[in-house]
């Protein structure tokens, strides 16, 4: 198994520092891979990253929701979306995204495609070996 970062990720980077096997990397190029990604072959399923995410974007692979129910106001971050987000990450650095949209309260979203997207990133994503 592995843990998976879903489209609720806004590149805060807080999870990266706590991973004992350093298997979380920022997607590059960001426009094509807007999330951070977990290497499924390296992740040891320790769960340390989950409480570090301010956006509750990380799940064990078998618990990624197929019908995530939005609280309202959280942002989905996916290629093809056009909303703009600017914020500060865990290290105080500017994060700028142009691939988001806000979720309405009660809206449901299937986050399970992110499982394959995570795996695919490590099977040839152009920036997969690059680390911040
Ligand atoms: S802490 Fe959450 S938002 Fe930040 S990079 Fe990790 S998964 Fe993404
Ligand atoms: S579950 Fe543990 S090993 Fe896997 S990505 Fe999270 S912190 Fe790293």
Image: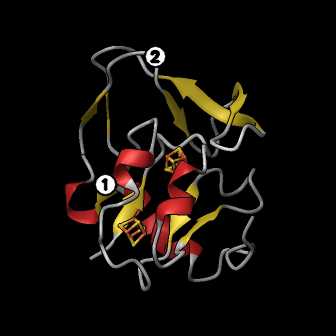
Give neighbour class at mark 2: few <14, some 14-19, many 20+ (Cα, 10 Å): few
Give the CA distance from mark 1 to mark 2.
20 Å
Q: Quadrant of the C terminus?
A: bottom right
Q: How is the image coloured?
A: secondary structure
- Quarter of the image holding residue 17? bottom right
Q: Are marks 1 and 2 in contact (CB under 8 Å)?
A: no
Indicate the position of residue 67 as horizontal and vertical percent values: 24, 38
Q: In percent of the image, x 54 and y 75: which residue is there?
A: 22
Where residue 106 appears, as percent x and y from the top left, is: 27, 17
The label on residue 41 is: none
Q: Is residue 43 above or below residue 86?
A: below
Viewer-proximal residue among 122 and 18: 18
SS category of the residue bearing label 1 = strand
Residue 100, picture quadrant: top right
Spot the residue most to the left: 62
Relative height, residue 15 to residue 37 (above, below): above
Q: Position of residue 76 (x, y in %)?
A: 51, 34
Tell me residue 107's x, y (percent). 32, 22
Ligand 1 contact, mark 2 (Cβ < 8 Å): no
Quarter of the view holding residue 3: bottom left
Earlier sequence position, callout 1 versus callout 2: 1
Question: Residue, x 72% and y 70% (percent of image)?
Answer: 131
Q: Is residue 73 left or right of residue 121?
A: left
Q: In the shown orientation, is residue 23 left or right of residue 33?
A: left
- Please tell me how crowded label 1 is: few (under 14), some (14-19), or many (20+) other residues with Cα within 10 Å: some
In this figure, which residue is indicated by the disc labeled 2?
73
Q: Label 2, secondary structure: give it.
A: loop
Q: Is mark 1 within 8 Å of ligand 1?
A: no
Question: Mark 1 highlights which residue?
Answer: 59
As drawn, is 43 to the left or to the right of 77?
A: left
Q: Quadrant of the N terminus?
A: bottom left
How many numbered marks have been drawn onto this rendered protein structure? Answer: 2
């Amino acid at each position: 198994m592995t843990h998976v970062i879903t489209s609720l990720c806004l590149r805060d980077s807080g999870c990266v520092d706590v991973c004992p096997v350093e298997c979380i990397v920022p997607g590059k190029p960001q426009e094509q891979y807007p999330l951070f990604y977990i290497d499924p072959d390296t992740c040891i399923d320790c769960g340390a990253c989950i409480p570090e995410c301010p956006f509750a974007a990380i799940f064990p692979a078998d618990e990624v929701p197929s019908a995530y129910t939005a609280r309202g106001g959280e942002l989905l971050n996916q290629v093809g979306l056009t909303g703009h987000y600017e914020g500060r990450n865990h290290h105080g650095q500017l994060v700028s995204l142009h691939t988001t949209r806000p979720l309405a309260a009660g809206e449901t979203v299937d986050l399970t495609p992110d499982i394959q997207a995570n795996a695919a990133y490590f099977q040839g994503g152009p920036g997969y070996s690059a680390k911040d």
